[in-house]
Image (spheres, rainbow, N blue to C red):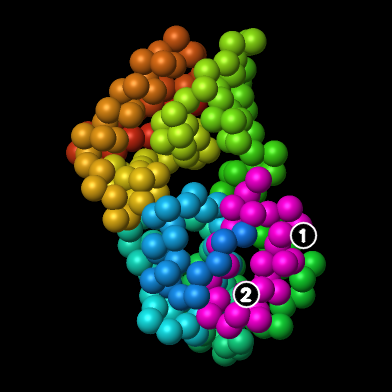
Amino acid sequence: MFHIMVVEDDKHTAKLLSTILTHAGYEVFCAGNGLAALELMDKQHIDLIVLDIMMPQMDGYEFTRQLRDAGNILPILMLTAKQLQEDKYKGFIVGTDDYMVKPVNEEEMLLRIKALLRRAKIVNEHKLTIGKISLDYDAFTVSREGESQTLPQKEFYLLYKLLSYPDKIFTRIQLMDEIWGMDSETTDATVNVHINRLRKKFEHYPEFDIVSIRGIGYKVVKNCD
């Protein structure tokens, strides 16, 4: 099940969005402003964010900017009453993926969310297939030709992220922020240890290689279509 965070200070709107998303099969978490959302993300894995702009303490623009500056690439859908073109432009400049003006059409919003999840390469069934390898996001398992391994949560998230974006270079800071949380005390060494464990577990799998980019981070190279 996908985890969607609704960041909205109006309680009535937040409740309405939560109900719509829950009925559509998503697990929903709510935060009243950007600061509360950042705290929630440290404790809870999130797949997509539905975000208001005008909020106390930290508005949607600043929240999005901080996520993107930290290298977090979670899909973000801004929902706002601000209709001016410059408001929309500012939203895209700071890093939102999509933008809708309130009141939103429920069906259109759900279609846009599905599209954003597809673009993020998180498939609807929470499974990813690379050649003969299948990753099950809900079970933390990696299967190949009848053999299956269940990975620790962080190792699985790390492998799933890299395999979802082959040839994309992720810095160690990006991986630390997204997998462990921005306020985590995780260091480069922790990421390196998890990468080495993954390499050892899958060293005989010909479908992919985890490549080190010296001084930067890591990427996955696919060896199959």
Residue 166 visible from this viewpoint = no
Q: Amino acid at mark 1?
A: His
Whether 187 is among the magenta residues is no
Residue identified by numbered label 1: 23
Q: Is residue 138 above or below residue 36?
A: above
Q: Is residue 85 above or below residue 149?
A: below
State the image coordinates of residue 203 (x, y, percent, origin top left). Answer: 40, 13
Whether 23 is among the magenta residues is yes
**Residue 69 in which image quadrant:** bottom left
Q: Dot 1, how many residues are within 10 Å of its Cα: few (below 14), some (14-19), or many (20+)?
A: few
Q: Residue at x 63, y 10 (%)?
A: 145
Q: Amino acid at mark 2?
A: Ala
Q: Residue at x 26, y 43 (%)?
A: 186
Residue identified by numbered label 2: 14
Q: Residue at x 40, y 64 (%)?
A: 38
State the image coordinates of residue 92 (x, y, percent, origin top left). Answer: 49, 72
Q: In this picture, which residue range is highlighted in magenta?
A: 1-27
The dot on residue 201 is: none
* Picture quarter with the C terminus: top right
State the image coordinates of residue 113 (x, y, percent, origin top left). Answer: 66, 60
Q: Residue at x 65, y 79 (%)?
A: 13
- Where disc 2 sits, the SS reads helix
Q: Is residue 70 above or below residue 156?
A: below
